[in-house]
Amino acid sequence: MGRGILLSGGADIDFMIHGVFSYELFGQTVWITTTHICVLIVMLVLAIFSIIAGRTMKKAEEIPKGFQNVVEIVVEMLDGVVTNTMGKNAPGFKNYIGTIFIFILVSNISGLFGLRPPTADYGVTLPLGLMTFTLIHFNKFKYQKVSGVIKGLCDPWPFWAPINIIGDVAVPISLSLRLFANILSGTVIMALIYGLLSKFALIWPAALHVYFDLFSGAIQTYVFCMLTMTYISDAMTTE
Amino acid sequence: MEFNNNFILGCSAIGAGLAVIAGIGPGVGQGIAAGHAAAAVGRNPGAKGDITSTMLLGQAVAETTGLYGLLIAMLLLFVKPLLP
């Protein structure tokens, strides 16, 4: 990826996305990158977890123990978060919010296991933001009807509409950039520490991993889901 | 007018440094949020959990503007869009 001009450009500072192999599609060269592989690993882990969870819950017992306990805690926690935020709109969104919560959380903390976090690639976070955008506007048209949407656009005065449209378009961009930039900054800082202090980075970087991977990743996951839920329930309220 | 590549890289580095000054704003904002949250916990210690989660949410939203500056700095340093 060329010599970074950063800090006299160590060749061992590496946090970029690399292509693994390429193929031709309609005359375009398409790369399978490290992000694809990390997403696949995350998906595999989640799929195995859910298969085991499904098997455990099939022979669930009255008094939970072991793995059943873990699954019940996770599901109850996600249910509680969605119900507290969305109120009466919650039942339709528990599955979606729970899914993206678990996916983003596992992606963010996959830096702990030596992967490059998939969410440190804008190609992963932008689709998440666009899904939120689609849900917001689908529900807006469904619940407020076309007249309500037009009324919302011309909120203080009719000539205010362009500003409102910019505000609507900014929602997915800011959502995805927030997640992307937080995880990327953590990845860059860890790469700098390991690259520059290679001999001295022995045990103490673990504390930084706790902050940048666990704390920051969990907070950003929570914020992404919280904002998604707030925007959607905003769109679903009719005056 | 022709510019040397090294000159462009140096100017990109200066620009990246200037872009990260954007971090001042979120720092002040997050400090204000944390201060008010501490005051709120002092007034009503029972609501500590709610106050903490609200504070973290607000702080993460306030952080966004600073992260935009960071992104500009990253683009200037690593993607080098100004090089011909």
Image (cartoon, rainbow, N blue to C red):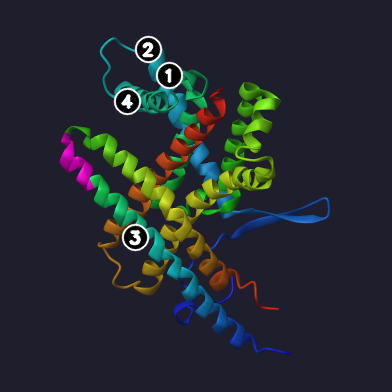
Give the Cα separation between the discs numbered 4 and 1: 16 Å
- Visible in this render: residue A188? yes
Q: Does B13 lie within the magenta span? A: no
B82 or B23, nearer to the observer: B23
Whether labels 2 and 3 belong to a single chain: the reply is no
Q: Is residue B52 left or right of residue A83?
A: left
Q: Amino acid at mark 4?
A: Ile
First of labels 4, 1 by sequence position: 1
Which is more foreground, mark 3 or mark 1?
3
Residue hosting label 1: A55
What residue type is disc 2 on?
Answer: Lys
Q: Which residue is mark 2?
A: A59
Query: Which mark identifies residue B28?
Result: 3
Q: Is residue A182 left or right of residue B31?
A: right
Say which residue label 4 marks.
A73
Cβ atoms under marks 4 and 1 closer than 8 Å = no
> Of discs 2 and 3, which sits in the foreground?
3
First reached walking from the N terminus: tag 2 or tag 4: 2
Give the CA separation, mark 2 to mark 3.
53 Å
